[in-house]
Image: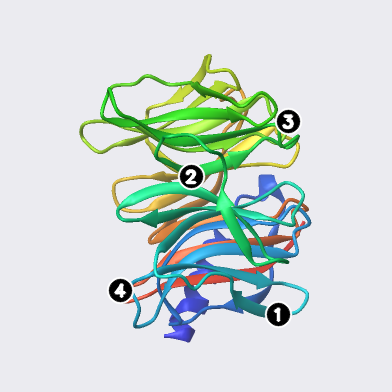
């Protein structure tokens, strides 16, 4: 199995376009068969740690794990009886936010690893999930449940003015919003009635800027300078990793014709990558370094 996985990794990076001028250098971590399902990978601001949510082999509960790159170690950060999903680093790198499912209700919590304490991210009566901070930490965007429309929409919460603002009012579910590092844009997914996932972008106060509706798109992440964003595009038989300028122009195909690519993200310093491959029985997390 390990040999097959290494071959898959080599195939992936053999298809990265020369336009980006980077290639695989070394593999630092391979989860092998430790985790049944892996989701929501996210690099720390200093590029030294990767947080992810996963179910360990033999367990169906999602917990939060952190891989420490300099120490080559992995730590289970949560061990409650509830599912914890979609972890994201606070911009200061000292805290995490994640979704916690309690009695079938999902809300965002903030966790301090030093004190090992958690609390709700904000005190509002709204089901919330999939948070993403602005770099100045004044705002967090998230997917919140609109009880009138009976679906999920994109909201922001302002920590300074204690203001909750609904940005989207779509007939479809809106999910997985991600703030650009400069705080000007939010990219998110809209799932239509046929379950097709479309990437859309708006500015920080909700004005629509971009819709990528030619192919399915998901798992978006920004370059650190906010000039480009990257996402997984699903074709008929496989997945591709696509890069676009913030205005939707100058497309680059970073990875082509790759089956079972579930998630991919490059560290803020662009020295490391992390990806999740979906296997038959397990998901595989691979972390490694890049050559530019």
> N-terminal of the two: label 2 or label 1?
1
* Residue bearing mark 4: 280
Q: CA distance from mark 2 to mark 3?
A: 19 Å
Q: What x and y, as percent, mark residue 149?
A: 27, 23
Most foreground residue, 175 or 82: 82
Mark in front: 4 vs 1: 1
Relative to 55, 252 lies left or right: right
Q: SS class of the residue under badge 4?
A: loop
Q: What is the spatial separation of the Cα atoms under label 3 and label 4, in whole angstroms?
A: 39 Å
What's the CA distance linking mark 2 and mark 1?
27 Å
Residue 224 position by quadrant: top right
Residue 231 is at least partly visible in this image = no
Residue at position x 47%, y 85% from top? Answer: 2
As displayed, is residue 158 above or below residue 6?
Answer: above
User: What residue is at 25 percent from the left and 38 percent from the top?
Assistant: 195
Relative vertical location of residue 156 with respect to residue 128 in this rendering, above or below: above
Camera-near label (2 vs 3) is 2
Q: Are marks 2 and 1 in contact (CB under 8 Å)?
A: no
Q: Secondary structure at mark 3?
A: loop
Q: Residue at x 42, y 34 (%)?
A: 125
| Mark linked to residue 182 | 3
Colour scheme shown = rainbow
Q: CA distance from mark 2 to mark 4?
A: 27 Å
Provide the secondary structure element on which disc 2 rests. Answer: strand
- Mark 2 against mark 1, which lies toward the viewer? 2
What residue is pinned by disc 2? 130
What number is the disc on residue 207?
Answer: none
Where 129 falls versus 248 (above or below)?
Answer: below
Q: Residue furthest left?
A: 194
Which comes sooner in the sequence, label 3 or label 1?
1
Closer to the N terminus: mark 4 or mark 1? 1
């Amino acid at each position: 199995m390990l040999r097959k996985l290494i071959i898959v990794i080599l195939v992936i990076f053999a298809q990265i376009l020369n336009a980006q001028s980077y290639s695989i250098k070394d593999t630092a971590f391979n989860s092998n068969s430790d985790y049944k399902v892996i989701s929501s990978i996210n690099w720390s601001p200093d590029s030294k740690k990767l947080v992810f949510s996963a179910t360990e082999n033999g367990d169906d509960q999602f917990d939060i794990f952190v891989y420490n790159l300099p120490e080559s170690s992995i730590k289970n950060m949560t061990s409650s009886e509830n599912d914890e999903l979609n972890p994201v680093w606070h911009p200061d790198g000292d805290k995490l936010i994640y979704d916690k499912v309690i009695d079938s209700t999902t809300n965002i919590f903030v966790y301090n690893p030093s004190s090992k304490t958690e609390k709700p991210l904000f005190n509002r009566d709204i089901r919330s999930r999939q948070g993403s901070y602005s770099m100045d930490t004044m705002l967090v965007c998230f997917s919140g449940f609109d009880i009138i429309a009976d679906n999920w929409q994109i909201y922001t919460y302002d920590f300074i003015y204690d203001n909750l603002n609904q940005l989207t009012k779509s007939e479809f579910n809106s999910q997985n919003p991600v703030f650009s590092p400069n705080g000007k844009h939010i990219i998110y997914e809209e799932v239509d009635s046929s379950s097709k996932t479309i990437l859309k972008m708006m500015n920080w106060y909700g004005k629509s800027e971009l819709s990528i509706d030619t192919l399915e798109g998901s798992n978006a992440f920004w370059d650190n300078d906010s000039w480009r964003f990257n996402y997984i595009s699903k074709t008929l038989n496989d997945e591709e990793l696509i890069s676009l300028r913030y205005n939707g122009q100058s497309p680059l195909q970073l990875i082509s014709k790759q089956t079972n690519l579930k998630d991919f993200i490059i560290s803020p310093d662009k020295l490391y990558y992390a990806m999740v491959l979906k296997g038959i029985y397990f998901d595989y997390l691979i972390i490694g370094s890049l050559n530019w």
